[in-house]
Amino acid sequence: MWWLVYLLLLNAALGLAALEWAWKKLAPVRDPANENLHKKYYGFRRLDVAKWKKMRFQIGAATTFLPKLIGFILVIFVTGVLTKLVTLGVTVTEERPLTGWRSKAVNFFIYVGASVLL
């Protein structure tokens, strides 16, 4: 049962490391004084940045990182395999895009995969 403790510690360490990396990369977005960025990407501006508390993100990152990562990889893999099976034998180019039932099936797989990820 000792491996479970190591797995939980690994989950917490990886989750916190990923959060710290993302928190550092999001510094320009979190800065309300960065008007150039907010003017350039007005539709993507965050109005709730003042309410972001790092501790709340750390709790989520330390507890759910590995299950979310495994689920993400699994959903991407299954969506890719199903899409590959549906488009077997079809050549898709810019001049000849995917149409018909195959297009609807691929759109459905992507829609369901994205819904599961959220």
Image (cartoon, rainbow, N blue to C red):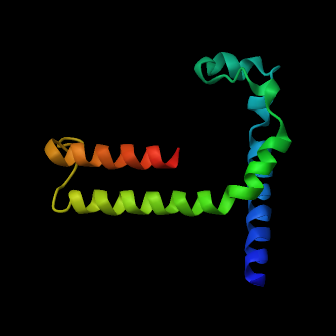
Q: x%, y% of residue 70?
A: 56, 64
55 sits to left or right of 90? right
Asked whether the viewer can see residue 116, the reply is yes
Residue 65 found in image quarter = bottom right
Residue farthest to the front?
1
Q: Residue at x 69, y 24 (%)?
A: 46
Q: x%, y% of residue 82?
A: 30, 60
> Quadrant location of the N terminus?
bottom right
Query: Total number of numbered labels?
Result: 0
Q: Residue at x 17, y 43 (%)?
A: 96
Q: x%, y% of residue 85?
A: 24, 63
Residue 104 found in image quarter = top left
Could you say which is closer to the camera, residue 59 or residue 84? 59
Asked whether the viewer can see residue 31, the reply is no
Q: Residue at x 78, y 30 (%)?
A: 30
| Above or below for 72 versus 105 | below
108 sits to left or right of 91? right
Could you say which is closer to the camera, residue 33 or residue 8? 8
93 sits to left or right of 76? left
30 sits to left or right of 93? right
Q: Residue at x 73, y 46 (%)?
A: 22
